[in-house]
Image (cartoon, rainbow, N blue to C red):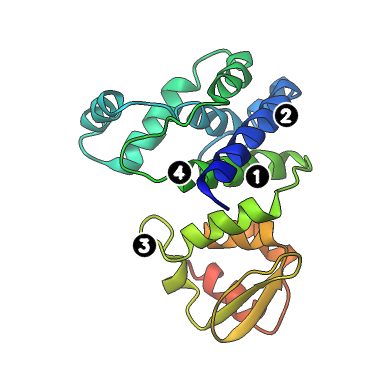
Amino acid sequence: MDRDEVWQAIDDERRSLADLLDDLSGPEWETPSLCAGWRVREVAAHLTLAHAGPLSALAWLVRARGDFHRMILDSAVRQAELPVDRFAILLRGMVGSRRKAPGISHLEPLIDILVHGQDIAIPLGRTRPMPLAAAAAAANRVWPMGWPFHARRILNGLELVATDHPWSVGQGRRVEGPMASLLLLITGRRAALPALSGPGTAELAARLAEGH
């Protein structure tokens, strides 16, 4: 995907996620997401902060005493105090903009909206199809990254192969499944496991159970 196609995919995902958020009930907002310690509410709130500028980010980092993980959590918790009907409005307000947080490429917002959309939808039993080309573009960015995913190191010795899109990475025992599930896997979501198969799945499950 070229840069324009990536931004179009981000816009489409923000619109569709906003539609999903509009449909959530009170209890669904309080449901634990796939992100440990985060409710659906915090994940949605985090996504609305994607346009934060460098001054805001610096202030949050200072408040978190330089702990980046703490900064991300604290900013989401504070944003989650907004009325829940604001989150869909804020997401739709981002559509058409190419603004992004400092120090990242145009692919990080794509990863965020694709993966966090599933972090919200899967625990709620909501079906949220993931566009295949966009998922592959996001996965190509995630695979070689170190922090925060370290996917290539964690999954060393395994070959990941998509069954619904021409995408594969790695070498070794094969693990195959839908492109969306592979993206969730390489971003650390164990919820991807039931959709995966192949001779490497037993080893994969054992590694993830050990926390690798």
Q: Residues within 10 Å of mark 1 (few under 14, many from 20)?
A: many
Residue 36 visible in rendering? no
Mark 4 lies on residue: 106
Residue drawn at x 36%, y 62% is 146
Q: Residues within 10 Å of mark 3 (few under 14, many from 20)?
A: few
Mark 2 lies on residue: 20
Q: CA distance from mark 4 to mark 2?
A: 24 Å
Mark 1 lies on residue: 118
Q: Amino acid at mark 1?
A: Gln
Residue drawn at x 39%, y 55% is 148
Q: CA distance from mark 4 to mark 3?
A: 17 Å
Residue 60 visible in rendering? yes
Between disc 4 and disc 1, the foreground one is 4
* Relative to 194, residue 99 above or below: above
Residue 84: which quarter of the image? top right
Query: At which x and y percent is residue 5?
Result: 59, 44
Q: CA distance from mark 4 to mark 1?
A: 20 Å
* Relative to 5, residue 62 above or below: above
Q: Depth check: give the residue in front, 51 or 199.
A: 51
Badge 2 marks a residue whose secondary structure is helix
Badge 3 marks a residue whose secondary structure is loop
Asked if marks 4 and 1 touch (Cβ < 8 Å), the reply is no
Mark 3 lies on residue: 146
Between disc 4 and disc 3, the foreground one is 4
Residue 126: numbered disc? none
Q: Earlier in the sequence, mark 4 or mark 2?
A: 2
Query: At which x and y percent is residue 196?
Result: 71, 69
